[in-house]
Image (spheres, helix red, strand yellow):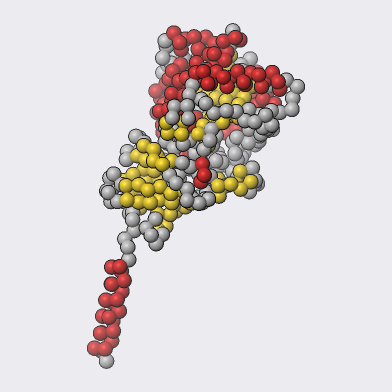
Amino acid sequence: MIRLVSLFLTIIFVIAQARSDEAPSPPLDFIDTSFENASPLYYEFAEDGTVQVFLLYDQERLSPNRAAGHFHFRIQAAKGQKLTLELKNMANVWNSKAGSVAKEIKQVVISQDGKNWTPVATESPEEGRVRVTLEMPADSLFVARAEPYRVSDLNRFLDEIKASPLVRIETIGKTVQGRDLEIIRVGNDDAPNHVFIRARAHPWEPVGNWVVEGLVRRLLKGDADAQKCLALYNVCILPMANKDGVERGGTRFNLGGWDLNRKWDKPADPKLAPENAALERWLESEIKAGRRPTFAMDLHNDGNGMLHISRPDIPDIDAYLARMARFEQCLRDHTWFTVGSTKPSFRNPGTLGEGWFTRFGIDAVILEFNCNYIEGIKQPAMGKHWITFGEGLTNAFEAYFEPRK
């Protein structure tokens, strides 16, 4: 009897071992999200070896709106291993309307060191998912939707420019989690025109930080062209409005569940949106000091690119639209901007663009950049090209303000 039991157990062990030997090994060791700006996610392996990456949504307070579209993670696998990644959970809800962000994702960027990035084309086999095939150049590879710009990158930039006599950096408030919100001032407060720029209201959209770097560095060169620009205008910049979201790898909302590019048609809630409340207090103090912004611009990314110009029903709208048409032409003349502006019926009262115009009498627009491709230079969208745009933007402002001297 003992021999029979022993024989039976041996057979069970052999069968189990055989089945174990037949089971395919996972195509990767791990997906690491332990670092700054990494996106929250989980992953599974399909039967064919595809790595299914499920992005986690962030939610808007008191709303059905949700967003997942930021991804930044590190693959750990054997050098030479070929991997197919499938990114999922992209059924977002914007302004209470469902819509997948998958169709907007035409490329990812990859990097071995997290600093030097290369674009790779993606495919969308069906609504709601994105696939990309990669070969591991080493045992570790970073993957992101767009070339990242992190809180640490901003801190490095601020440290570099703060010694310039043309720069002042002031803290105007704190985020939900207590991170400092800085305003960068470049130029003379007595300049005849005042430009305000906000970046990173939506944490996945890094373009604004790259553009700001290009613009500030160009103005600080000290050559005749920079001096001519700063004789016409100064610039105040909120470089990273949603620092908490950037640090934690969020997509759209702040940690209070607030979209920082909505609800600008009324005063901000200081408890839920301290970032917007701090900016509003700063703006009111600037107006009181006689430094009302002449022009304001909010910088964003999407999968298309557009200059968003609202058309509220106010008496002086035609004069405003004429000024914005002039600004659009200045962009075309001095940067690689080629996309158009929103249709004549466009309105979005909650954005900074329309909110600042109607509440504070400030000419303001939303400039959205295609995160995949730059038609004006026929290149994949990368940080270095957005820096170039920022450099050209200095001359676009100069041309725009020239007749107002």
Q: How many marks?
A: 0
User: Do we see residue 300 in this rendering?
Assistant: no
Q: Is residue 48 left or right of residue 292?
A: left
Q: Is residue 292 left or right of residue 243?
A: right
- 101, above or below 337, in the image: below
Task: Please name whichever residue, 341 or 166, is drawn nearer the observer in this view of the structure.
Answer: 341
Task: Locate residue 163, reporting x and y percent.
Answer: 41, 18
Against 347, residue 105 (above or below) is below
Q: Residue furthest right?
A: 315
The structure residue drawn at horizontal position 60% and vertical position 9%, both measured from the top left corner, is 403
- Could you say where residue 124 lies in the image, as x and y percent from the top left? 47, 48
Q: Quadrant of the C terminus?
A: top right
Residue at the (62%, 38%) spot, across then down: 271
The outermost residue toward the bottom is 1
Q: Does residue 401 appear anywhere in the picture?
A: yes
In the rendered image, the quadrant that contains the N terminus is bottom left
In front: 86, or 14?
Answer: 86
Q: Residue at x 61, y 48 (%)?
A: 98
Where, by quadrant of the figure, is residue 275 drawn? top right
- Identify whether 368 is placed above or below 398: below
Q: Nearer the viewer, residue 104 or 249?
A: 104
Q: Is residue 233 left or right of residue 356?
A: left
- Place of residue 280 in the rendered image (x, y in percent of width and height, measured from the top left): 62, 28
Q: Residue 111 placed where, x, y %?
A: 35, 39
Please tell me which residue is depicted at 43% across the width and 16% down the height of the picture.
Answer: 220
